[in-house]
Amino acid sequence: MPKKIINTKNAPAPIGPYNQAVRTGNLLFISGQIALDAHSNNLLNSSIAEETHQVMKNLQSILQAEGANFEHVVKTTIFLTSMDLFAEVNEIYASYFTTDHPARETVAVKGLPKNVNVEISMIAAL
């Protein structure tokens, strides 16, 4: 099955050898997003709340590029630099889903790109 590369100007450009997302059939695989602003390329991470909202906005922009929204998301992975951030990130993350929540895992990692505190990737069924 052929794949379609997805890149939108409404989400940060990749900072490595990958694309924002790849679609194959009805599945959309979204690369991990961090709190980079798509237009200024600045990190928006003055607080974990600001950082998490920006990550979710970046993911939303990529979903919208394929005519999708958070209701289409079937799986997510959340990477945190500390599980101490879990409760606040979880609350903000949950606010973006209005119906059934997707499958998910949350893992603590030693470090993330650009020293951010949270990175989230998604898979959506379109």
Image: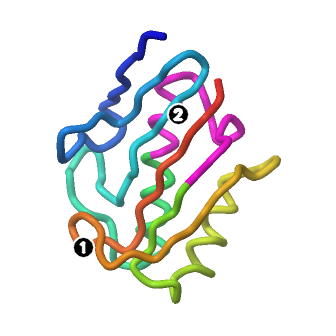
Residue most extreme to the bottom:
84
- Tell me which amino acid carries mark 2: Leu
Which residue is more in the foreground, 53 or 22? Answer: 22
Q: Residue at x 29, y 44 (%)?
A: 12
Which residue is more in the foreground, 59 or 83? Answer: 83
Label 2 residue SS: helix
- Tell me which amino acid carries mark 1: Asn
Q: Quadrant of residue 51?
A: bottom left
Q: Residue at x 50, y 54 (%)?
A: 56
What residue span does the magenta drawing correspond to? 59-76
* Side (left or right) of 75 relative to 80: right
Asked if residue 22 is positioned above or below residue 43 in the image, the reply reads above
Q: Position of residue 118 (x, y in %)?
A: 42, 68
Which residue is more in the foreground, 51 or 14? Answer: 14
Residue wearing tag 2: 63
Q: Classify 10 Å Cα crowding around label 2: few (below 14), some (14-19), many (20 and above).
A: many
Residue wearing tag 1: 115
Residue most extreme to the top:
2
* Side (left or right) of 50 relative to 72: left
